[in-house]
Image: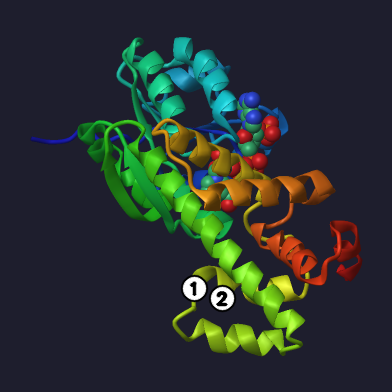
Amino acid sequence: MTIDKLHQVVVYGLGAMGRPMARNLHKQGLLIGVKNRTQGKAQAMQKELGLTPFEDEAELFAAADTILTCVSADNDLKDIIQHIIPLLKPGSVVIDCSTVSPKTAQSVSDDLAANGIAFLDAPVSGGVEGAKKGSLSIMVGGDREHYKRAEDIFSAIGSQITHMGKVGQGQATKAVNQVMVAGVAQAVCSALAMAEQCKLDVKKVVEVLSAGAAGNWFLENRGQTMIKNEFNVGFKLDLLLKDLHICQSTLDSMDAALPLVQNSIEDYRRLSEAGYGDEDISALIRLKRCLLNQEDLTQESENDG
Ligand code: NAP
């Protein structure tokens, strides 16, 4: 049986992740248009990629067989889905690459299904670097037949693509991923703050430990930048804080709790309130230094170059 592959994509949400995803879809000839709340970003990308302009958004969405959304948070996704439902053609598919809760994925899927539109939750991991390289890990929930139809789209933006099960199970996998990300950041930031306190050459510590049993992606890619107090790269800690609340609500729904999640929420909330919300998650080392030096966060920022 031949599969009716999806190949006319509109990307909705041209943030740090959506823009490179749109470029990679364009390279594979799969992108027909882009849409963004702040219209200037959509116009700039349309010009950059030489996309054929549409008369209006009704014409744009009517021409698409797939809408790939990548927006900030749960309510943003819900709002745009309500807005586009009347514009989508029955039989089309919405693929959501935002990180939202499994519950939101299910509710959006139900709203779309009532209008004859399919839904796949497809959160990603690999950061802006992965989005640019087209090497994201993609964890997909939803009907397997639609997953198969979307294979070319997923291959254009990712290199590890896994069907996890029914709607919501992609997002549940992403929540598990974020618990791990938070745990690794806790371990590496605490340990490197200790290395500083021991007056070790921390650059050498990162080099030697990266090659041993404690080696990991975060240490290798963020170790050298965090000891130089450079936090302007990578994954904004406000986004991890949002994701950790999703982890917490997922655990709550099972009457469960993980201290790692609760402690990480508390740490990132403090950093965010102190004005570091746009910094990379490795800025957690600021708090760990304060803990070891018995300083407060205001004194820590005096180390900035
Ligand atoms: P971003 O750079 O802050 O971009 C957010 C996008 O969402 C923008 O296009 C923004 O439009 C749009 N948006 C926000 N609220 C909206 C609303 N109410 N209605 C319509 N559009 C709205 O964020 P990002 O880094 O691309 O992240 C997008 C998603 O991917 C998030 O769920 C994030 O958790 C997830 N993610 C991010 C990373 C990462 O490393 N950054 C990695 C994995 C997953 P405007 O341009 O108008 O503001």
Secondary element at image label 1? loop
Secondary element at image label 2? helix
Question: Is residue 125 in sight in this rendering?
Answer: no
Residue located at (56% from left, 60% from top)? 129
Q: Residues within 10 Å of mark 1 (few under 14, many from 20)?
A: some
Q: Residues within 10 Å of mark 2 (few under 14, many from 20)?
A: some
Which quadrant would residue 106 be assigned to in this image? Answer: top left
Q: Is residue 232 above or below residue 79?
A: below
Residue located at (76% from left, 70% from top)? 292
Q: Position of residue 119 (x, y in %)?
A: 35, 27
Indicate the quadrant containing the C terminus: top left, top right, bottom left or bottom right. Answer: bottom right
Indicate the quadrant containing the N terminus: top left, top right, bottom left or bottom right. Answer: top left
Question: Is residue 74 in sight in this rendering?
Answer: yes
Within 8 Å of ligand 1, the CB of disc 1?
no
Q: Position of residue 224 (x, y in %)?
A: 67, 77
Q: Give left or right: position of 13 versus 166.
A: right
Of 210 and 82, nearer the camera is 210
Of 44 and 166, nearer the camera is 166
Amino acid at pointer 1 = Asn
Q: Is residue 101 above or below residue 292?
A: above
Amino acid at pointer 2 = Glu
Q: Position of residue 279 (x, y in %)?
A: 73, 55
Label drawn at residue 294: none
Q: Give left or right: position of 203 versus 177.
A: right
Residue located at (30% from left, 19% from top)? 91
Label drawn at residue 216: 1
